[in-house]
Image: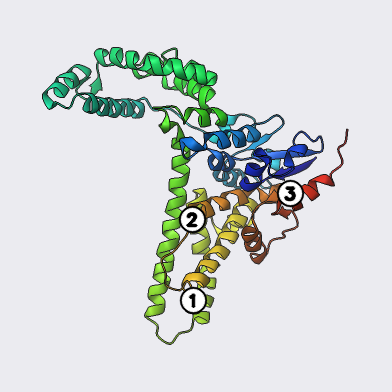
């Protein structure tokens, strides 16, 4: 069985029929694997994107697809085993791919509902005295009153009926009042977490729910991911600003000398540990990192990316020298896919990432970038049926 990990660009074009990959889904000699990074990148960012996004998500969750733990949990698996195999990274349930170890907090959800209720009162009752009167009935000592739950259930009923019609998977969560039973303490956090996971752990359901009024917070999973990618962008931006300041303070020192210093820093244990910590969480020693191929590749390739950015923005001979950095959070997200490359037979990415992997000293034999190259590789695999 040939194992394949597609780039999100390949998935998007396959879902819209712009390449010929669809003919290989269900191929008895090919196993396609997808990760949480795929899901987050395919989730709609705006309601208008839902149609295309849902097609991508349906493909990812399609018949015969296999799923992998997040890149952070790849690091955990590699750290806990002497040798890690692809099957060690596979997960059977969608919830394990998207929300491993997730637990619903009653206090957090109560706060969300209180804040939403205050916003609703502000919208409906511009008069401050009327609004305060209503708030006194609905909130007491910062807690929701029985009157509040009665009010909220009435407000929620119409929306829940609509959601149940348009989104059957969410019905157990929305239409039977489980949310408010949970908030009132009639359902345990463990029980509601299970309901929540079974109702919303399907990425297609997430995509559909996100387009319904009042359900935009369903995309918190996506927002958390992209916020973290933006933090990495900001960290990289600070590094470049520091390098520019260093260069300005060393008149007469050419860029090549500075670049050799940057390259030494990129190869240092401190830098590599910092990258591993930023992307994957734990503090990793050089000895540990040497035994963790997926995590090590991510760190190695990111080091090459830092050198690229330095060549663009810190080199006086570059047309982009000293200009405002134009880094994209999607570039950071691309690195999260690299954790899986050492474990599959065919790995899809773009040409820039393939070059980084090559410059980092890794083999690129299993990497494909274009649709035509990918389809050619897949066409050579016997069907075995």
Identify which residue is drawn at 51% across, 38% down. Answer: 49
Verify CB contact (< 8 Å) between mark 2 and mark 1: no
| Rendered image quadrant of residue 130 | top left
First in residue order: circle 2 vs circle 1: 1
Q: Is residue 320 left or right of residue 249?
A: right
In this rendering, the label closer to the viewer, 3 or 1: 1
Residue 182 picture location, percent across and down: 39, 18
Residue, disc 1: 315
Residue reaching furthest to the left: 129
Q: In 3D space, how far apart are the residues under numbered discs 2 and 1 (Cα atoms)?
A: 20 Å
Identify which residue is drawn at 50% across, 33% down. Answer: 101
Residue 202 appears in view: no
In this rendering, the label closer to the viewer, 2 or 3: 2
Residue, disc 2: 328
Crowdedness near tag 2: few (<14), some (14–19) or many (≥20) residues, C-alpha within 10 Å: few
In which quadrant of the rendered image does the C terminus lie? top right
Residue 368 picture location, percent across and down: 72, 53
Residue 118, above or below 309: above
In this rendered view, identify the residue nearer to me: 84 or 35.
Answer: 35
Q: In 3D space, how far apart are the residues under numbered discs 3 and 1 (Cα atoms)?
A: 36 Å
Verify CB contact (< 8 Å) between mark 2 and mark 3: no
Residue, disc 3: 346
In which quadrant of the rendered image does the N terminus lie? top right
């Amino acid at each position: 069985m040939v194992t394949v990990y597609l780039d999100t660009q390949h998935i998007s074009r396959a879902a819209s029929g712009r390449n010929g990959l669809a003919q290989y889904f269900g191929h008895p000699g090919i196993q396609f694997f997808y990760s949480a990074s795929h899901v987050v990148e395919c989730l709609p960012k705006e309601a208008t994107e839902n149609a295309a996004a849902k097609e991508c998500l349906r493909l990812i969750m399609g018949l015969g697809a296999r799923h992998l733990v997040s890149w952070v949990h790849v690091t955990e698996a590699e750290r806990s085993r002497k040798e890690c195999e692809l099957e060690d990274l596979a997960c059977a349930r969608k919830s394990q791919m998207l929300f491993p170890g997730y637990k619903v907090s009653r206090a957090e959800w109560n706060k969300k509902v209180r804040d939403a209720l205050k916003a609703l009162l502000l919208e409906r009752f511009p008069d401050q005295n009327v609004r305060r009167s209503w708030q006194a009935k609905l909130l007491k000592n910062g807690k929701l009153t029985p009157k509040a739950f009665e009010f909220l259930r009435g407000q929620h009923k119409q929306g829940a009926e609509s959601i149940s019609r348009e989104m059957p998977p969410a019905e157990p969560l929305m239409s039977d009042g489980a949310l408010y039973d949970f908030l009132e303490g009639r359902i345990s956090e463990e029980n509601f977490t299970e309901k929540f996971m079974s109702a919303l752990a399907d990425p297609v359901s997430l995509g559909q729910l996100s387009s319904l009024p009042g359900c935009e917070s369903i995309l918190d999973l996506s927002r958390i991911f992209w916020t973290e990618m933006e933090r990495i962008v900001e960290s990289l931006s600070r590094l470049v600003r520091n390098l520019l300041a260093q260069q300005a303070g060393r008149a007469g020192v050419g860029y090549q000398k500075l670049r050799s210093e940057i390259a030494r820093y990129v190869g240092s244990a401190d830098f590599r540990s910092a990258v591993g910590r930023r992307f994957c969480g734990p503090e990793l020693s050089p000895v540990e990192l040497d035994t963790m191929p997926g995590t090590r590749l991510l760190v190695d390739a990111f080091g090459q990316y830092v050198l690229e950015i330095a060549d663009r923005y810190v080199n006086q001979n570059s047309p982009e020298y000293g200009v405002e950095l134009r880094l994209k959070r999607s570039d950071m997200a691309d690195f999260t896919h690299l954790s899986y490359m050492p474990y599959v037979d065919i790995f899809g990415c773009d040409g820039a990432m393939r070059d980084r992997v090559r410059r980092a000293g890794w083999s690129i034999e299993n990497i494909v970038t274009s649709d035509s190259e990918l389809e050619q590789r897949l066409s050579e695999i016997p069907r075995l049926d």
